[in-house]
Image: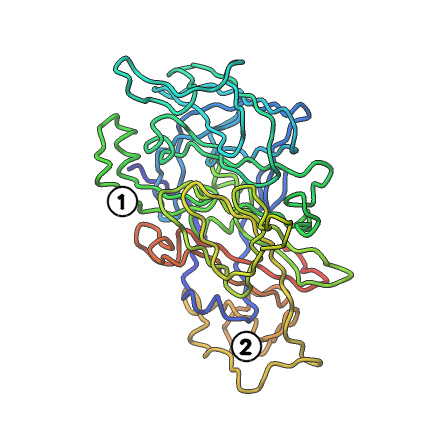
Amino acid sequence: MPSLNRKRLRLVAPVALIAATVGVMVVPGPQSSAAGPVDGMECETSSSNSFSLTASGGYASTPDGNAIYMWSYGDTGGSFQLPGPTLCVESGAHVTVALRNALPEPTSIMFPGQNNVYANGKPAQPETDANGTLTSMTTSAGANSGTVTYTFTAGNPGTYLYQSGTDVQKQQQMGLYGALVVRPKGHADWDNNNSSSAFSPEHEYLFLLSEVDPDAHLAVERKRAFNWNNYTPRYFMINGRSMPDTIAPNHAAWLPSQPYGALIHIQPYDAAKNPKPALIRYLNAGTTSYPFHPHGSDEQLIARDGHPAQGPGGEDLSYSNFLIDPAPGQTIDTLMTWKQEYDPKTNPIPSDIKLPQLQDQIVGPGTETWFSEDPYLGQTNSQLPAGVVQNNQCGEYYHVAHSHALQQSTNFGASFGGMMTLIRIDPLNGCPTQ
């Protein structure tokens, strides 16, 4: 596999330390190289609800220096990107997706959860070869510049995958997937048609979870056969990135083909200043369930696969959970609210709760600490030992969020990587930028 020599942010601290409810700080990296939000979900929209995608090959990089050959859907006329762009439409909209195929074999797009999908003006149909063997679950575009245009009316509000319907095991593993977000008509700040799903539009996040077996990708790159009985994923990704790249900004300059970060950046609940929760959309494009665990705060599960968590009479069946476990092909929508528990004056931390020993807080060469040395959100303590650098900007907190199947929190077996990111909670009045 070819190697990429790139400067990367190395974070080597035990998971248990990051999970502690004390202020920590990640060394700021370079800013985004393109317009758009630095963090959070980035929508691709169209006034006509028409999109043009090209299936093509390119390379994705991993934090250990590897470059892995992938396939993906990218904007036609644009560059290769992993995953495909997040398409955002309104419920009831007439949606058109034109696919151009630049791959050496036929491919297609399925839109699970959308009804009455048409291809080139006719109902999309499975395809078979001359022997009657199924070759595609939907109408495909031929190899090397074939085209097909899909149309459908956007269904229930919610979160959906779009993915290849051709040679699914291979092509989805190669990276042919993306997210489709259907918004309620007239309520862009609701997840679904219930007002209880309202969220802060500035705090909308998407976690597209996936995995990679580099041996399979190398075989495809070199046009060799691959025995899928030997399939063994080694990299685990959120939005096409592995930790620590997941916490880099959207469109980070050193990740030109992996535009979407996965850092959650929020503030505490406040009835006047910050009354609405964050919305997190989970999608599983892999082959197994990913038991995703956000430390420090539960999340309210409000929908699965575009279906609100409610009973037949409209009863609220949403629930709070500390483990979000999307099955393969499934999507889950959650609301997250951070409520500050401790205040040095009105609700001090009990005296029997101690900060970790300093030697357990040191990162890297022993001159930097993740902790602010103050347990209260919004405050820092400058009484650090000589030579120890405080990376905390303004007393913000960081909590880890990762797969609880711990092999999925590694980069080819190296721990503190893979399907992992951070949740950053700033003081209510904000945090100065650097």
For residue 359, above or below residue 202: below
For residue 290, above or below residue 155: below
Q: CA distance from mark 1 to mark 2?
A: 45 Å
Assess disc 1: are there few (<14), some (14-19) or many (≥20) residues with their C-alpha within 10 Å of its C-alpha: few
| Of residues 204 and 219, the one drawn nearer to the viewer in this rendering | 204
Of discs 1 and 2, which sits in the foreground? 1
| Mark 1 vs 2, N-terminal side | 1
The residue indicated by pointer 2 is 384
Q: Are marks 1 and 2 in contact (CB under 8 Å)?
A: no
| Of residues 49 and 110, the one drawn nearer to the viewer in this rendering | 110
Q: Amino acid at mark 1?
A: Thr
Residue 80 percent coordinates (x, y): 46, 29
Residue 400 percent coordinates (x, y): 49, 61
Residue 332 percent coordinates (x, y): 52, 48
Q: Amino acid at mark 2?
A: Leu
Q: Is residue 133 left or right of residue 88?
A: left
| Of residues 330 and 67, the one drawn nearer to the viewer in this rendering | 330
Q: Is residue 50 left or right of residue 13?
A: right
Q: Which mark is residue 196?
A: none
The residue indicated by pointer 1 is 232
Residue at x 43%, y 40% (from the top left corner): 329
- Furthest-right residue in view? 272
Judging from the image, what secondary structure is the residue with disc 2 in?
loop
For residue 295, above or below residue 317: below
Judging from the image, what secondary structure is the residue with disc 1 in?
loop
